[in-house]
Image (cartoon, rainbow, N blue to C red):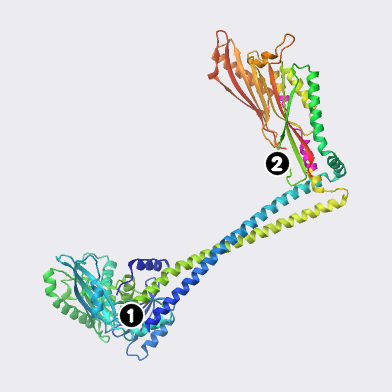
């Protein structure tokens, strides 16, 4: 009688082992699925938070400028019409004016200018918007023989800067030795300034990107 | 016939210790059957059924059914149980085999239930070893067979079968351990107790060897003194029997009595025993024995369950014990693993649902804001894209913010005229690249040039210069360091470079 029982017990153990193994496998397979669901939910929540924050900022802005909407809208339409031309015009005008300052201040050498497009998107810009902020770094170099003149020239430059431009750096360096480049520039009539000035200006322009 | 492997037994004990110990002990004695229910080695319920009752098996089975989830241990002390001492020689061989297995195969039926205890292995012989063994056996017969089959077929957790004759060795040791007595371990120990199931049980033990055992009927209708006298007589007979043995080994005799308080007191005062070491252990169990307080079945079984050692078996029982042990060892941890996984899955799902609810709330807020935005847009139909217009307005607002320029700072710096200080380099910049802050920093390299070479004079001039700087840059932090290492000293002049930093910290935009 007990020999049948041994077989019966073996069967029970085998059956339990199979059931437990299948359960563990099935439950184990569910873990990545549920983890994936959780990650997706968190991702969705993150997106919703960003959208909500943008929406709050937008609504606050709209409420703030609601009275000025007609005026802003006309400026906006103007931007749509002249967006591309405006950028070039601004830079061309700035370069002309700098040349004019060199003449006006009777500088030994004309003001040197270098313009570089900055492709880094500033954090203040809404990346999903068609309204973008273009940035150009303008490096201006000139020499002078006194700090007073430097202040005058710099002041003149600041006055001709377009709206949105910002001086990010200004270096003034007094030359301590004659370099071959300076010696070449020497003449009997005049002498080059021994104080070198470098100004870095960031031009920021609003443009419409289609 | 093998015993269960030690590893499996260790694992089984570990699992049993991890989970609460709920055990049923079926004590099949010479007079009847006692079943006790143990929880954490304490008897919580019991029943005694005499063989005189025709339906004694049915009564036992009915009682067992109340405790179906308990592990069942069977202790055999039926009239058919026998013990036998054997000396088994084992010749030296590369392959070591257990000589007892061979002996059992040759001398017993495969169905017989057998347990053994190798109490000594004599290794002093030249040609091998001699295993000194005590073996207990019982035929697989009623009532043992019927009870076992009932237990196993009704899905009780069968946890093994043992012989009282062999377990008395560990029970005696346990009594001495509980009394914290170690000095009588090498004495000839004579143990006596009274059980309802088997009557008066007397066992003689030397070290690990149960030399002899004896059962005498319990005179239930007699006085305590009569009972004590009966036990005294039986023990005296045994002492007489083992007198030569004791003398030849120069042993002392220790009498151990497990009984109630009254009998223990009488036992301790028996005059003829005063020359021996006497240890009495009275039962303090909260569960009273049936009819009389003399019976020590419960205490005996509690001691047994705590200290059981020699698992008995026959071929089929061995398989059954092994299988039930495997069942217990494997499936409890597996059950825990599955429970753990389910809890983890529930946690994941709950967290996921929670996040989804939060997302829905955020979306609802977003839609309500969008609705407000749309209502404003409706008031201005000429606006094509309110979102672009907003961004345009925001950027315009930012671009129109007046940011700091270097001119004011430079004017202040150049205005400070000090004949001994020469400005070499000025570097002004806005620290924050996103212009959300108006923090600026100006570093200035100046040179102290003078014919005053005295250190105090130098310090004074520089200190005066910094003081005047601080007076014109009142909202700024000014730090300076004098680079004495780069000092140039000529015949008439002393030149020392100094680095200055002027920084401001103004509220953000």
The answer to whether residue B107 is left or right of residue B249 is right
Q: Mark 2 highlights which residue? A: A123
Instruction: Answer with the quarter of the image where residue B249 lies.
Output: bottom left
Mark 1 and 2 residues: CB-CB less than 8 Å, in contact?
Answer: no
Quadrant showing the C terminus of chain A: top right
Q: Is residue B257 visible?
A: no
Residue shown at 40% from the left, 82% from the top: A4
Quadrant showing the N terminus of chain A: bottom left
Give yes or no for residue A38 being in the magenta stretch.
no
Residue B58, x across and y down, in percent = 39, 88
Residue A128, x across and y down, in percent = 74, 47
Density class for disc 1 (Cα within 10 Å; few <14, some 14-19, many ≥20) is many
Residue shown at 13% from the left, 75% from the top: B243
As rendered, which of B116 and B188 lies closer to the eye?
B116
Query: Which region of the structure is painted magenta?
Result: B392-409
Tell me, for residue B27, which label it has, or none. Answer: 1
């Amino acid at each position: 009688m007990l020999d049948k029982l041994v077989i019966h017990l073996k069967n029970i153990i085998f059956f339990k082992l199979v059931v437990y193994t299948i359960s563990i496998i099935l439950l184990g397979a569910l873990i990545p699925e549920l983890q994936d669901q959780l990650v997706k939910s968190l991702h969705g929540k993150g997106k919703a938070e960003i959208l909500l924050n943008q929406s709050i900022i937008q609504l606050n802005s709209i409420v703030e400028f609601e009275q000025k909407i007609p005026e802003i809208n006309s400026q906006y339409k103007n931007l749509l019409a002249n967006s591309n031309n405006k950028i070039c015009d601004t830079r061309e005008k700035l370069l002309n004016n700098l040349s004019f300052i060199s003449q006006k201040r009777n500088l030994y050498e004309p003001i040197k200018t270098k313009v570089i497009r900055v492709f880094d998107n500033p954090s203040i810009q809404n990346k999903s918007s068609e309204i973008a902020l273009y940035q150009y770094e303008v490096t201006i170099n000139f020499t002078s023989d006194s700090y007073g003149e430097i202040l005058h020239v710099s002041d003149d430059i600041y006055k001709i800067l377009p709206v949105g431009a910002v001086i990010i750096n200004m270096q003034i360096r007094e030359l301590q030795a004659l370099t071959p480049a300076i010696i070449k520039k020497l003449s009997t009539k005049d002498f080059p300034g021994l104080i070198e000035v470098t100004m870095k200006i960031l031009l920021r322009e609003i443009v419409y990107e289609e | 016939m093998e015993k269960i492997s030690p590893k499996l037994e260790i694992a089984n004990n570990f699992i049993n210790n991890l989970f609460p110990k709920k055990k049923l002990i079926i004590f099949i004695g010479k007079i009847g059957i006692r079943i006790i229910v143990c929880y954490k080695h304490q008897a919580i319920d019991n029943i005694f059924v005499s063989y005189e009752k025709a339906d004694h098996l049915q009564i036992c089975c009915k009682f067992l059914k109340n405790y179906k989830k308990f592990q069942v241990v069977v202790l055999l002390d039926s009239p058919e149980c026998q013990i036998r001492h054997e000396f088994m020689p084992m010749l030296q061989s590369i392959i070591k085999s257990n000589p007892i297995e061979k002996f059992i195969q040759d001398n017993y039926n495969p169905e017989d239930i057998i347990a053994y205890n190798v109490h000594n292995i004599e290794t002093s012989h030249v040609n091998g070893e001699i295993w000194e063994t005590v073996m207990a056996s019982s035929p697989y017969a009623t009532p043992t067979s019927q009870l076992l089959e009932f237990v196993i077929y009704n899905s009780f957790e069968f946890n093994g079968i043992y012989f009282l004759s062999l377990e008395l060795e560990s029970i005696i040791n346990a009594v001495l351990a509980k009394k914290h007595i170690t000095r009588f371990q090498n004495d000839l120990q004579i143990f006596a107790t009274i059980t309802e199931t088997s009557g008066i049980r007397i066992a003689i033990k030397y070290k690990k060897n149960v030399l002899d055992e004896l059962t005498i009927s319990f005179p239930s209708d007699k006085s305590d003194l009569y009972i004590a006298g009966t036990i005294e007589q039986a023990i005296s007979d045994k002492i007489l029997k083992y007198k030569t043995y004791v003398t030849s080994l120069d042993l002392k005799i220790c009498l151990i009595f497990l009984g109630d308080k009254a009998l223990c007191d009488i036992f301790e005062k028996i005059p003829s025993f005063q020359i021996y070491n006497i240890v009495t252990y009275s039962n303090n169990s909260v569960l009273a024995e049936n009819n009389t307080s003399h019976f020590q079945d419960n205490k005996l079984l509690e001691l047994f369950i705590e200290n059981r050692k020699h698992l008995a078996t026959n071929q089929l029982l061995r398989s059954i014990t092994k299988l039930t042990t495997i069942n217990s060892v494997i499936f409890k941890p597996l059950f825990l693993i599955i429970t753990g996984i389910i809890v983890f899955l529930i946690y994941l799902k709950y967290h996921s649902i929670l996040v989804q609810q939060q997302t829905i709330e955020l979306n609802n807020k977003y839609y309500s804001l969008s609705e407000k935005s749309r209502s404003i847009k409706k008031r201005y139909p000429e606006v094509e894209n309110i979102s672009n217009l907003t961004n345009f307005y925001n950027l315009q607002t930012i671009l129109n913010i007046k940011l700091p320029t270097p001119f004011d700072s430079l004017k202040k710096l150049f205005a400070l005229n000090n004949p001994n200080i020469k400005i070499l380099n000025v570097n002004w910049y806005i620290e924050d690249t996103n212009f959300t802050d108006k923090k600026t920093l100006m570093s200035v390299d100046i040179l102290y040039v003078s014919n005053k070479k005295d250190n105090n004079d130098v310090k004074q001039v520089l200190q005066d210069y910094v003081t005047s700087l601080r007076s014109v840059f009142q909202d700024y932090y000014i730090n300076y360091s004098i680079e004495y290492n780069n000092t140039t000293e000529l015949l008439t002049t002393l030149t020392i470079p100094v680095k200055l930093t002027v920084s401001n910290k103004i509220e953000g935009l």
